[in-house]
Image (cartoon, helix red, strand yellow):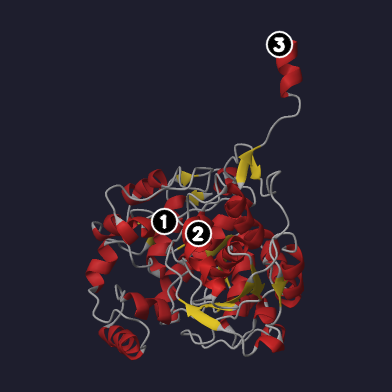
Amino acid sequence: MNGANGSLDFEKLWKQPSNRDFVPCVQPGSNYTAPDESRGYLLVHTNGGLNQMRAGICDMVAVARIINATLVVPELDKRSFWQDTSNFSDVFDEDHFINALANDVKVIKKLPKDLSSATKVVMHFRSWSGLEYYRDEIASLWEEFQVIRAAKSDSRLANNHLPPDIQKLRCRACYEALRFSPKIEAMGKLLVDRMRAYGPFIALHLRYEKDMLAFSGCTHGLSDVEAEELRTIRENTAYWKIKDINATEQRSRGYCPLTPTEVGIFLTGLGYPSNTPIYIAAGEIYGGDTHMADLRSRYPILMSKEKLASVEELEPFTNHASQMAALDYIVSVESDVFIPSYSGNMARAVEGHRRFLGHRKTISPDRLVKLFSGTRLVLTHIYGLLMEGRKVSNRISEIHKKLQGSPRRRRGPVSGTKGMERFRSEEAFYVNPLPDCLCKRVCENVNASTASMR
C-alpha cells in the first residue's frame, strides 16, 4: 500500500495496541453492602449533548450512593442548542439501567405523586467535588428537605481521590448499566455490519459542525460570510457566555478542530491509503461539499449513517440529535480505528469506552496546528504521495507512533495550576478509567511456574 511514508504493511495500519493484560475490574470490594435506607430523593436535570449527559448521569449514580438517596431516572436536556425532545427511555434502556444498579442505588422512574408537595431544594452542586462535600454538606440537607434537585450534572464529581468502590460504581454505571435503547442498539449494529462489508474501517469523529464552530469561535479556513454567520449564532445564543473570541488565538491554543482538509493530510501522514473505508461520525458538516471536497478526493469511501441506511430506516431517529449521536457513538466504539478531529465530549467518551473494552486503537491528533501553520501545504496528489511532502508526513507518523490508545494511567493536574483550574486541567475520569476500573490480569499458573522454577 502506498501511503505518505511509502509501502506500509496492512497489519501495521490496523493492529491494535497491546492491552498489556489490563482487563476490567469493576466488582465492588468485600466490604461493599447493599444501599442503605434511602433518606430522600435525588432529581437530576442533565445538561449538554449526549456524552456530556452520559458522564453526568453516571456521576449522579455515585452521588446518590454517597448521600443515601433514591435516584429518580434523570431528565435529559431539552433546552440545549439541538432542542431535542427525547426522554431518557428514548435514548437509553431504562429498565436495564434500573435493574443493573439494584445492588448499588435504588432507582425509580418517577417521583411518587404523594411527594408533589414535599419540601424540595434546587442545588447547583459544586464542580469537581469529593466525598466529604457530598457526605457532609449535601447529605445534611436531608434534615430539612425530602427532595434534592441537581440543576446540572456535568463535572459535579472529582476525577480522582474518591474511594475505590465509588470509582468502580461510576464505571459499572457507564459501561454496564447505561446502554442505549433496544431500537438504537439494533440500528447501531446494522450500521457497523454495513461498514464491515467494506473491510477494516476508521470511524472519524469530524467535529466540524455549525454549533461547534459557532461556540468555539473557530473560523480557520472559512469565508468572511461564514465567519460572520457563526459570530451571529454565538451572539444570539444566550447561554453561551463568551461572545468575543479571537479565532487565531483559539486555534494556536489547540481549542479548534482540524478542518476536513487537515484531517485528510493527517490520515495520509499516518499511512492510510486512499481506499480506506471511513465512517464520518458527525452531524451536518458546516459548508457541506465546499469543505469536504479535498478530504473526499483523498478518501472516496466516506460513509455516514445517512449513506449506510435508508431514509425510512433512519426516520425514527431523525430530528433527535441525541439519538443520532448515539448511533455514531456505537459505530465509533466498534470501529477498527477511532480518530477524533477534536478532543470534545464525544471523543473523550469514546476513547474511554474503547480503553475499557481492551484498549482498541484510538489515534488522537497532537501538535498538528503548529506543524500545519509552519508548512506551505499544496493539496495536489503526485504518484500517491502528497506535495505537502515527506517531511510533514514523516513528522505526523513520528508524533503519533505512541499515541494509539495503549494503556497508561490517567493524567493528573497540570503542574502549577491551582483552584478550579487545577481540577479543570486533570484528565477526565471517563477518558481513561485506569487505574480505578482496569487491573492487570493475574495468571493462574504463576505460583506453579514459580515453584517449578525453584
- What's the CA distance linking mark 2 and mark 3? 45 Å
- Specify which label sits upstream in the sequence, 3 or 1: 1
- What's the CA distance linking mark 2 and mark 1? 8 Å
Is the residue marked by circle 3 packed among few (<14), some (14-19), or many (20+) residues within 10 Å? few
Return the residue nearer the eye: 383 or 182.
182
The residue tagged with tag 3: helix, strand or loop? helix
95 sits left or right of 398 in the view: right
On residue 339, the disc is: 2
Q: In which quadrant of the rendered image does the C terminus lie?
A: top right
Of the residues shown, which amino acid type is indicated by label 3? Met
203 sits left or right of 375 in the view: right
Give the residue number, with chain letter if any, for mark 3.
Answer: 453
Q: Quadrant of residue 244?
A: bottom left
Of discs 2 and 3, which sits in the foreground? 3
Of discs 3 and 1, which sits in the foreground? 3
Q: Is residue 21 above or below residue 56?
A: above
Location of residue 72 in the rendering, given as x and y in whole percent from the top left corner: 65, 76
On residue 365, the disc is: 1
Location of residue 76 in the rendering, given as x and y in whole percent from the top left corner: 58, 80
The residue tagged with tag 2: helix, strand or loop? strand
Of the residues shown, which amino acid type is indicated by label 2? Ile
The residue tagged with tag 1: helix, strand or loop? loop
Can residue 133 be seen by looking at this rendering?
yes
Of the residues shown, which amino acid type is indicated by label 1? Pro
Return the residue nearer the eye: 138 or 79.
138
Can residue 383 be seen by looking at this rendering?
no
- Specify which label sits upstream in the sequence, 2 or 1: 2
Location of residue 136 in the rendering, given as x and y in whole percent from the top left corner: 50, 61
Write the residue at 47% across / 55% down.
159
Is the residue marked by circle 2 packed among few (<14), some (14-19), or many (20+) residues within 10 Å? many
